[in-house]
Image (tube, grey):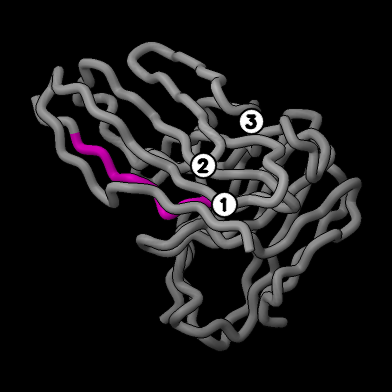
Amino acid sequence: EDQVTQSPEALRLQEGESSSLNCSYTVSGLRGLFWYRQDPGKGPEFLFTLYSAGEEKEKERLKATLTKKESFLHITAPKPEDSATYLCAVRGDDMRFGAGTRLTVKP
Amino acid sequence: ETGVTQTPRHLVMGMTNKKSLKCEQHLGHNAMYWYKQSAKKPLELMFVYSLEERVENNSVPSRFSPECPNSSHLFLHLHTLQPEDSALYLCASSQGQGSGNSPLHFGNGTRLTVT
């Protein structure tokens, strides 16, 4: 059965303190790995799609990378406005989501 | 209006009430989805419609009844719910159900509380 596990469950950073979020997955035939950002009281907002191992995507302070077993979302010099829950999802036969990492960035 | 719009944003209902959630997408997509989001749990897929036909129903109790009258609109009819049904209900759309490279685009959800 396809599975997606995100870690850590919660992460607290100081402004400017870079770190990474992890998304480990098992899927029969990866057709895409997706990262979303979700702010309180809102729906998930699409960030990136990755298709194959070795691929990288960047957007402002965020960079997503992909291997055959996991994906990382690297946050460089985060700001308080980066505080949100980050969701990872994989598409094999269907779309499966992780439980998310709740990121808090303190000024 | 752009994106995916859900109404109402908040809903409180008793266990004997009947209510409906509405979703409208302005993205020209041909697949629409209902998801349930509970605290600290992954999103749970409830229903998928592709080209207005239901293609997936993940063992959802019959007290939830979806309706997709056209490719832009999706409803979730609710009746005799239980307190454990309290959650954030998210609607999403995509271009092509099951297509590998098509992300889901979500609305802001309806926060449902069952008393």
Query: Measuring 21% from the left and 16% from the top, which residue is drawn there?
Result: A77
Q: Quadrant of residue B18?
A: bottom right
**Most foreground residue, A27 or B51:** A27
Looking at the rendered structure, the kind of residue marked 1 is: Thr
Q: Which residues are magenta?
A: A97-104
Mark 3 — on which chain does it sit? Answer: B
Question: Residue at the top extreme?
Answer: A60
Residue B6 in the image: state x and y as whole percent: 60, 47
In this rendering, position of residue B80 left or right of residue A87: right
Q: Please, what is the dominant secondary structure of the magenta stretch?
A: strand
**Most foreground residue, A88 or B89:** A88
Q: Quadrant of residue A79?
A: top left
**Most foreground residue, B28 or A104:** A104
The label on residue B3 is: 3
Of tags 3 and 1, which is closer to the observer? 1
- Mark 1 or mark 2, which has the lower sequence index? 1
Is residue A96 in the magenta section? no
In this rendering, position of residue A40 left or right of residue B2: left
Mark 1 is surrounded, within 10 Å at the Cα level, by few (under 14), some (14 to 19) or many (20 or more) other residues, namely: some
Alpha carbons under labels 2 and 3: distance apart: 32 Å
Asked if disc 1 and disc 2 are in contact, CB closer than 8 Å, the reply is yes
Mark 2 — on which chain does it sit? Answer: A
Query: Measuring 43% from the left and 35% from the top, which residue is drawn there?
Result: A37
Residue identified by numbered label 1: A26
Figure check: B58 above or below A72: below
- The image quadrant where one finds the N terminus of chain B is top right
Residue identified by numbered label 2: A69
Residue B43 in the image: state x and y as whole percent: 52, 57
Mark 1 — on which chain does it sit? Answer: A
Q: Quadrant of residue A51?
A: top right
